[in-house]
Image (cartoon, rainbow, N blue to C red):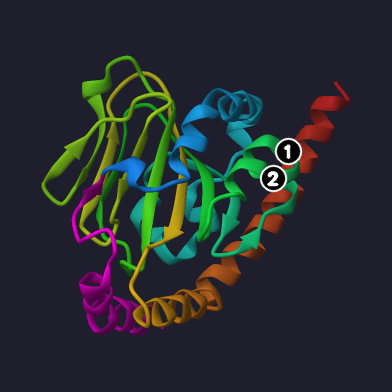
C-alpha cells in the first residue's frame, strides 16, 4: 500500500502539480509570499509559552515513529519527539485543548493539513528522506533554537538553512531533506503541512489525492496511536498531580 501511494503521488501526479504550481518548483520558498505567515511570526512568543508548558512533560512525549508508522524505520533510532495538533485533518482534541492559543492561530491557516511541535533533542540527526508527495508544502516556525545556529540546521536538496526563533522556513519536502541538532540544547519548531497553491483544475486533483492519503491506514493509524498516547499522558499528569 505504501509503495502504491508513493508511486501514485510522486511519479504520476507530482509532475502535474509541479507544472501547475502557483509558487514555482524549488526547495525553499520566500515565507512571506504566504499571507498567513506574518500571523504566526507576530504571535510566536505566545506559541512558545504554550510549548514551554508542554515541555514540562517532555519525557512523556511520543517519538515520531510511535505515532507515524508510515515512516517508522526512518526515525526509530532518533530522539525526535512530537506534540500533535492535526494529522491530515484529524484533530488531536486533547492536545489542542492544552494549547488553545496555538490552536486558534493555526486554525486560521487556509489549507492546513498537519500541525505539531517538532522537538529534536540534543545531538540527534534525522536521516535523509523524501516526502511522498509535493501537493503540500512544509512550514517551520522557530520556537526554541540553540545559540550555536551553525550546528543546527536543515538541508533540502542541495540548499541549507538554519532556524531562527520567531522566523519561518517554507520548503518542498518531496526533495530529499535531512535535519540535525549537533548542540547540547533542544530544538523545537512549529511544523505544518499546508496545501500547495496550484492552478485549476489540477487543484481539484491535488485535493483528491490529499484526501485519499488522509483515508490511508497510515494516517488512521496515527490517529489511533494519538488516542493511546492521550491516555498515557493523562496518567502521567494525574500522577504528578497526586504528588
**Quarter location, residue 235:** top right
Q: Nearer the viewer, residue 45 or 151?
A: 45
Give me the C-alpha separation between circle 1 and circle 2.
Answer: 5 Å
* SS for callout 1: helix
Q: Nearer the viewer, residue 166 or 133?
A: 166
Looking at the picture, how far across and down is residue 113, in whole percent? Answer: 52, 60
Q: Is residue 61 left or right of residue 140?
A: right
Q: Kindly check if marks 1 and 2 are in contact, taking CB atoms under 8 A apart as contact.
A: yes
Q: Which mark is residue 95?
A: 2
Question: Which residue is found at the position 62% from the left and 23% from the top?
Answer: 49
Q: Which residues are magenta?
A: 1-29
Badge 1 crowding class, 10 Å Cα cut-off, few under 14, some 14 to 19, many 20 or more, is some
Question: Which residue is found at the position 53% from the left and 73% from the top?
Answer: 214
Q: Is residue 22 left or right of residue 63?
A: left
Question: Which residue is found at the position 58% from the left and 69% from the top?
Answer: 221
Looking at the picture, how far across and down is residue 16, in whole percent? Answer: 25, 79
Residue sitting at the far top: 147
7 drawn magenta? yes
Relative to 133, say whether 205 is above or below: below
Relative to 99, say whether 149 is above or below: above
Q: Is residue 232 visible?
A: no
Q: Of helix, strand and loop, which mostly describes the magenta segment? A: helix
Q: Is residue 11 left or right of residue 37?
A: left
124 drawn magenta? no
Q: Mark 1 sits on what residue? A: 98
Badge 2 crowding class, 10 Å Cα cut-off, few under 14, some 14 to 19, many 20 or more, is some
Q: Please identify the quadrant where the N terminus is shown.
A: bottom left
Q: Nearer the viewer, residue 68 or 160?
A: 160
* SS for callout 2: helix
Looking at the picture, how far across and down is residue 102, in whole percent? Answer: 62, 38
Amino acid at each position: 500500500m505504501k509503495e502504491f501511494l508513493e508511486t501514485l503521488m510522486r511519479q504520476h501526479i507530482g509532475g502535474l502539480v509541479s507544472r501547475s504550481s502557483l509558487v514555482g518548483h524549488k526547495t525553499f520558498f520566500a515565507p512571506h509570499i504566504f499571507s498567513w505567515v506574518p500571523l504566526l511570526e507576530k504571535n510566536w512568543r505566545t506559541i512558545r509559552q504554550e510549548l514551554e508548558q508542554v515541555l514540562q512533560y517532555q519525557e512523556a512525549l511520543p517519538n515520531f515513529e510511535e505515532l507515524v508508522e508510515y515512516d517508522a524505520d526512518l526515525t526509530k533510532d532518533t530522539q525526535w519527539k512530537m506534540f500533535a495538533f492535526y494529522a491530515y485533518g484529524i484533530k488531536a482534541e486533547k492536545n489542542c485543548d492544552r494549547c488553545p492559543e496555538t490552536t486558534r492561530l493555526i486554525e486560521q491557516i487556509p489549507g492546513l493539513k498537519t500541525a505539531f511541535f517538532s522537538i529534536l533533542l540534543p545531538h540527534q540527526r534525522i536521516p535523509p528522506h523524501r516526502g511522498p508527495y509535493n501537493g503540500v508544502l512544509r512550514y517551520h516556525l522557530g520556537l526554541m533554537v540553540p545559540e550555536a545556529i551553525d550546528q543546527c540546521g536543515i538541508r533540502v536538496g542541495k540548499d541549507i538553512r538554519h532556524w531562527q526563533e520567531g522566523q519561518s522556513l517554507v520548503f518542498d519536502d518531496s526533495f530529499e531533506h535531512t535535519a540535525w541538532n549537533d548542540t547540547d540544547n533542544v530544538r523545537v519548531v512549529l511544523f505544518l503541512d499546508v496545501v500547495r497553491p496550484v492552478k485549476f483544475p489540477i487543484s481539484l486533483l491535488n485535493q483528491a489525492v490529499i484526501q485519499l492519503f488522509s483515508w490511508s491506514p497510515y494516517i488512521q493509524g496515527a490517529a489511533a496511536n494519538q488516542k493511546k498516547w492521550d491516555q498515557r499522558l493523562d496518567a502521567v499528569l494525574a500522577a504528578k498531580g497526586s504528588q
